[in-house]
Image (spheres, rainbow, N blue to C red):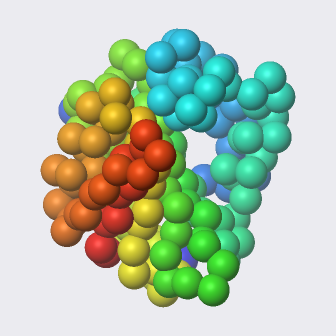
Amino acid sequence: MHATVLPETAMHPAIRQLGPADAEAIRALHAAMDAEDGYFRFFMPPPKDLHKVAHAIALRDPEHCAVGAFLGGELVGVANFIVLPGTRSAEVALVVAAEDQQHGIGTALLRSLAELAREHGIERFVAEVLPANSRMMRLLIDGGFPVTTYRQNGVVQVGIQL
């Protein structure tokens, strides 16, 4: 995989692909989420065992991929996908530290992850977003990709054409 690695500048984080060695930083990022962000990410309170979540995100194989944003060497955001079996689609998830939200980090992560997804032959991201999560909806809709949305069972289903 040869996704662009973006170096850190004063205004933008460094972005790179994550792997198993990043699992502890991924766990720490998720552990630091406030209650609202945790609920938006998991649709319930975050799981007690974030080690399992972190290791699943850090998997690096043809069906799993993650990128991280780093400021001052600290992981401040993660975007990951899991390929949906038998399709050219992947479910996408994203989290950015509360104090670093709304500064373009999520958008940069989504675009970097999309580049890797295309290298994997993925043509579409899908995401489930709670209607109250307006920041995530705005990020996905304004991310620079054609997007479709519909509501099903109280959740917004988002399709992102890569």
In this rendering, position of residue 83 left or right of residue 115: right
Q: Nearer the viewer, residue 153 or 112?
A: 153
**Residue 98 image offset from top left, x and y in percent:** 41, 19
Q: How many marks?
A: 0
Q: Nearer the viewer, residue 156 or 137?
A: 156
Residue for point 54% across, 54% down: 80
Residue for point 66% across, 79% down: 85
Q: Quadrant of the C terminus?
A: bottom left
In this rendering, position of residue 98 left or right of residue 138: right
Q: Is residue 24 above or below residue 48?
A: below
**Residue 156 image offset from top left, x and y in percent:** 37, 47
Q: Quadrant of the N terminus?
A: bottom right
Q: Is residue 47 above or below residue 93?
A: above
Q: Nearer the viewer, residue 89 or 76?
A: 89
Q: Residue furthest front?
A: 153
In this rendering, position of residue 38 left or right of residue 49: left
